[in-house]
Amino acid sequence: MGNPVIARGNTTRQANKLLRRQRILHVARHLIASQGFDAFTLSQLALEAEVSTPTIHNLFGKKADVFQELVADMVVKIGVAMSNPDVSDPIEGGEVFIDNLLQLYAKDEAFYRAAFIAGDRTKLFDHELPTGIFRQSMQIAQRICAAAKENGFLHGNIETAKLAEQLFACQRLARQDWVNGYIDLKRYRTQVLIGMYMTYAADARPDFYQRLCEKIEELSKN
């Protein structure tokens, strides 16, 4: 009869440990969003989360380890938002891609801004990381450009890899402007899409080129 009691005891302890971890991460997310990564401390985190500083050390490690766990969750969510883009039509696919991404950012805009700033500085979003969100973005851009060529939207006079680099650059520049507070999410969307459509236009077939011009004109009025 002793083993089931021990099992239940272990289960309870593990459940409580998980709840403490979740609460600490929730509070850390709030502190980073409201104060920035540099300003928040483990002692403040412990106070707000109603635990001791040694508890945070035992559950996570250092301040950077807490942030890294938040970033890992953030990368998963961004990956889901970017997954399975519609590559059948470059215009519709581009709109769905950016709308899914910005809907995610809008749910906790202050945190994502602060996390990107800290993540860039600590190299957690290094473009060379094989599993990083920027590598994923580049791979998606390559898929979209390759499909656009195969489906007859592009001439193929410009290498798809080069077009993909420019699509990625449009997204990266807009993200940096948003992170630094120069533009809001609405302008972020407009800036990305206009940049994407102008990139396509450099190699677009006539019918597609006309659609792109109409879309650029439409976005420019907003």
Image (cartoon, rainbow, N blue to C red):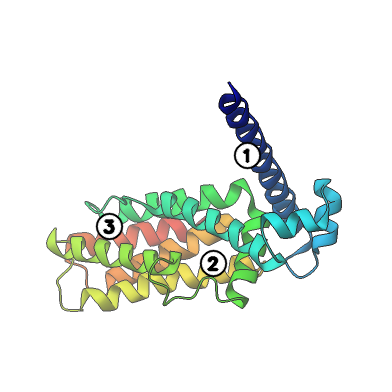
Front-most of residues 160 and 203: 160
The alpha-carbon separation of the residues under discs 1 and 3 comes to: 48 Å
The tag earlier along the polypeptide, 2 or 1, is: 1
Q: Secondary structure at mark 1?
A: helix
Q: Quadrant of the N terminus?
A: top right
Query: Which mark identifies residue 175?
Result: 2
The alpha-carbon separation of the residues under discs 3 and 2 comes to: 20 Å
Query: Which mark identifies residue 14?
Result: 1
Q: Which residue is mark 3?
A: 90
User: How many discs appear?
Assistant: 3
Please identify the quarter of the rendering in which residue 171 is found. Answer: bottom left
User: Residue at the location (27% across, 67% down)?
Assistant: 142
**Does residue 66 appear in the picture of this structure?**
yes
The alpha-carbon separation of the residues under discs 2 and 1 comes to: 39 Å
Front-most of residues 105 and 55: 55
User: Residue at the location (47% across, 53% down)?
Assistant: 76
Q: Amino acid at mark 2?
A: Arg
Name the spot of residue 31 as percent of width and height, x first.
Answer: 77, 56
The tag earlier along the polypeptide, 1 or 3, is: 1
Name the spot of residue 24 as percent of width and height, x first.
Answer: 72, 49
Q: Amino acid at mark 3?
A: Pro
**Does residue 184 appear in the picture of this structure?**
no
Q: Residues within 10 Å of mark 2 (few under 14, many from 20)?
A: many
Name the spot of residue 101 as percent of width and height, x first.
Answer: 47, 53
Residues at discs 2 and 1 in contact (Cβ within 8 Å): no
Q: Is residue 25 left or right of residue 202?
A: right
Nearer the camera: disc 1 or disc 3: 1
Q: Amino acid at mark 1?
A: Gln
